[in-house]
């Protein structure tokens, strides 16, 4: 993304946060010169994952499930 110096100055923290979140570099144009802001090391994809509550029950209740009632022995 290329922005001019005025836009960079007015949105400084938002633009820097975007660089940190996405890992994409930011180019700033001033007087026909282009400056580049980038991360030294790109963030890992796993670091950007958000936590989801997928279970509708306490995790302990899944560990002690008795599956014998559900088991059907269809083998001859």
Image (tube, rainbow, N blue to C red):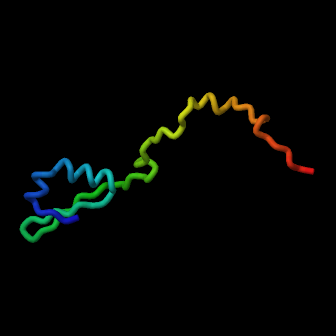
Query: Does 65 sit left or right of 68 as displayed?
Result: left
- Residue sitting nearer the eye, 76 or 64: 76
Q: Residue at x 45, y 41 (%)?
A: 51
Instruction: Report the front residue among 21 and 39.
Output: 21
| Figure quadrant of residue 69 | top right
Q: Nearer the viewer, residue 10 or 25?
A: 10
**Total numbered labels:** 0
Tell whether 47 sits left or right of 19.
right
Q: Whole-percent x and y of residue 34?
A: 16, 67
Quadrant position of residue 27: bottom left
Outermost residue toward the bottom in this view: 32
Establish if 59 lies above or below 42. above
Q: Position of residue 39 (x, y in %)?
A: 31, 55
The structure residue drawn at horizontal position 53% and vertical position 35%, both measured from the top left corner, is 56
Position above or below: 7 against 70: below
Image coordinates for residue 22, horizontal then vertical, percent: 33, 55
Q: Is residue 26 left or right of residue 60?
A: left
The residue that appears at 10% across and 52% down in the rendered structure is 10
Which quadrant of the figure has residue 1? bottom left
**Residue that appears at 27% across and 53% down:** 18
């Amino acid at each position: 993304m290329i922005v001019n110096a005025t836009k960079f100055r007015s949105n400084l923290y938002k633009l820097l946060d975007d660089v940190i979140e996405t890992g994409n570099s930011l180019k700033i144009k001033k007087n026909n010169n282009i400056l580049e802001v980038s991360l030294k090391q790109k963030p890992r994809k796993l670091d950007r994952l958000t936590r989801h509550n997928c279970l509708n029950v306490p995790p302990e209740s899944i560990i002690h499930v008795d599956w014998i009632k559900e088991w059907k022995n269809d083998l001859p």
